[in-house]
Image (cartoon, grey):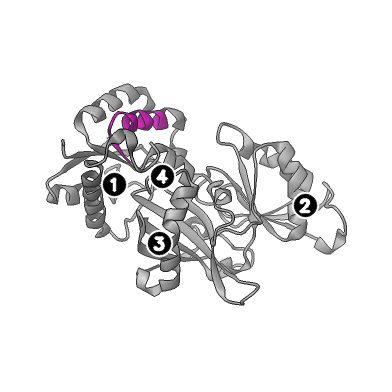
Amino acid sequence: MKKHVIIFEVRGGSDKGPYGFRRDSKPIIDSLKKRGWTAEIIFYQDKDRGEIYRYTHEKADAYISRVNPGNLKDETGYFQMLRELVANGIEGLPHPDAIVTYGAKNSIERLKGTAIVPDDIYTYYSFDELKEHFPKSLKKWVRVLKQNRGSTGEGIWRVELKNPKKYQGAIPLDAELKLTEAKDNHTETKILQDFLEFCIQYLEGNSGMIVDMPFLERIKEGEIRILMLRDKVMNVVHKKPASSKDAFSATLFSGAKYRYDTPEKWPDLVQLAEGMAPIIREKLGNYDIPLIWTADFILDTDKKTGKDKYILGEINASCVGFSTHLELSDNIADEVLDLMDAESVVNNKWGAFTK
């Protein structure tokens, strides 16, 4: 064993510190060094993909991916390199297909029928599907449409009819809509036909897709993000949207207020999340659970019991940070070493998880 880990990052983005890399990457390196391992950061560039692959394969036992796919001009080459590294014996933290599967908005649809995702969720892969089904969905209640690979609330729209009582039958294409984007909580008015055509941009490309889910009124009470270290909750962030009338976004850019809590303050959510982790793993392809990932929950009310319940909004496993709690780097380093030790006793050809 080489006892060396490579951390992949990409240049640019709002998540970087004054030296160009993520603020929470060096603490991971320092924690690994305390345990007798070494680590380094490599900034991925597609033009150097072959050289980066050869260097990593020669020098490292494992990689940690801390790249936001949205900061890559084309993510195809990056994920292909990671797949080749995993196929040739490098431990992927996480596996590249786990990054894609957990991070895609349609992961929510794959979890339909579980305790954390309602059945009233749909995905659209073509304009014809969107045009055919979304007006029927909109007739039920206020909806939220999400593009597949967006970040910071861009391409996430709350969609409501301006005059819902006006329509007794099917919603016509000239129906007026009130639209609010989570990026900054700004509102717009469009007719349904124009908005559907506007959404074509979210259907383009290999990962083009739109998720349609019900709007949950209790988002005003806040979104609860849990930071997971594999199957354990390490930290909880309560994200309360701005107080303005139309605000529903829980991003900092939109004016939301964040409060950082210990898991002990959210016992019911922690029990639910840790209990669901193996189910999430199975439903999302049976890849080994990502090293660091987050899940965002919104409070809802169970119509049968009147009790609180938590609804999953989305998962992120591509570039999760913990800069407000750098002490977690020791836990991360311990988990990396435990994983490497566990992998050393398993035949790579017939392992426990998808390769």
The secondary element bearing badge 3 is classed as helix
Q: Which mark is residue 274?
A: 3
User: Is 151 or 138 nearer to us in this picture?
Assistant: 138
| CA gap, disc 4 and disc 3 | 20 Å
- Determine crowd level at label 2: few under 14, some 14-19, many 20+ residues with C-alpha closer than 10 A: few
| CA gap, disc 4 and disc 1 | 22 Å
Closer to the N terminus: mark 2 or mark 4? 2
Q: Which mark is residue 284?
A: none
- Determine crowd level at label 1: few under 14, some 14-19, many 20+ residues with C-alpha closer than 10 A: few
Figure quadrant of residue 266: bottom left
Closer to the N terminus: mark 4 or mark 1? 1
User: Closer to the camera: disc 3 or disc 2?
Assistant: 3
Q: Main secondary structure of the magenta part?
A: helix
Across and down, in percent, residue 246 comes to 64, 63
Measuring 41% from the left and 47% from the top, which residue is drawn there?
Answer: 317
Q: Are marks 2 and 1 in contact (CB under 8 Å)?
A: no
The secondary element bearing badge 4 is classed as loop
Q: Are marks 3 and 2 in contact (CB under 8 Å)?
A: no
Measuring 29% from the left and 27% from the top, which residue is drawn there?
Answer: 52
